[in-house]
């Protein structure tokens, strides 16, 4: 599984892949951070399509076209807001990754790029989030042929280090 997961530092809006994941809010109508950057890079048609989706529940995912992005699709998933860990945050975060991978597979995506979901303004602890992300992705890939490659696109070196550590800790079955 490890060979199908990679961690890089970069700008998710510039990734050439089948689908990028948007760490969205539940309205799907844009916001700050990754969400705002994706909406700006994709252009106004993304917002127009998102309006037709009528939002999305935390832990679920919905897919749109990529418009002006190099990615064919954008998979939108609202991550959980961290409230101390006693409001099902970990399970909801894992559900975000699983839901995105299920949509990617259903839409024929072989390459998917994820940001670090919920670790920005939603304040999910970075190391814990990285572990959940890598473990959930690896578990999905263990029983699915697609996507063939999943990339964690980290905004900064601190985030990349957390995901590198989580990937290194993953034991090969």
Image (tube, rainbow, N blue to C red):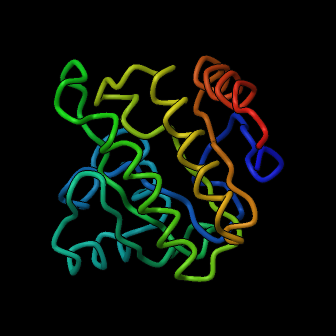
> Where's residue 10, x and y in %?
67, 39
The answer to whether residue 23 is above or below residue 100 is above
Residue 110, by quadrant, is: bottom right
Q: Residue at x 63, y 61 (%)?
A: 112
Q: Residue furthest right?
A: 3
> Where's residue 156, x and y in %?
61, 25
Residue 142 relative to residue 100: left or right = right
Q: Residue at x 59, y 50 (%)?
A: 137
> Where's residue 168, x and y in %?
75, 26
Residue 109, by quadrant, is: bottom right
The answer to whether residue 60 is above or below residue 102 is above
Residue 1 relative to residue 98: left or right = right
Where the C terminus falls, by quadrant?
Answer: top right
Residue 85 relative to residue 35: left or right = left
> Where's residue 172, x and y in %?
79, 39
- Judge by depth and name the residue closer to the eye, 50 or 172: 172
Q: Residue at x 46, y 52 (%)?
A: 97
The answer to whether residue 122 is above or below residue 10 is above
Residue 34, by quadrant, is: top left
The answer to whether residue 25 is above or below residue 112 is above
Q: Residue at x 61, y 21 (%)?
A: 162
């Amino acid at each position: 599984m490890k060979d199908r997961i990679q961690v890089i530092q970069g700008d998710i809006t510039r990734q050439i892949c089948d689908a990028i994941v948007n760490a969205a809010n539940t309205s799907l109508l844009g916001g700050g951070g990754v969400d705002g950057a994706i909406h700006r890079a994709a252009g106004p048609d993304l917002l127009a399509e998102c309006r037709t989706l009528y939002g999305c529940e935390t832990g679920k995912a919905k897919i749109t076209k990529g418009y002006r992005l190099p990615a064919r699709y954008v998979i939108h998933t609202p991550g959980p807001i961290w409230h101390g860990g006693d409001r099902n945050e970990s399970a909801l975060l894992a559900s975000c990754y699983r839901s995105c991978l299920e949509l990617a597979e259903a839409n024929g995506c072989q390459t998917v790029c994820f940001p670090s979901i919920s670790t920005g303004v939603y304040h999910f602890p970075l190391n814990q989030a990285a572990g959940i992300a890598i473990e959930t992705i690896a578990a999905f890939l263990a029983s699915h042929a697609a996507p063939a490659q999943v990339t964690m696109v980290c905004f900064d070196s601190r985030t990349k280090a957390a995901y590198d550590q989580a990937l290194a800790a993953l034991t090969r079955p």
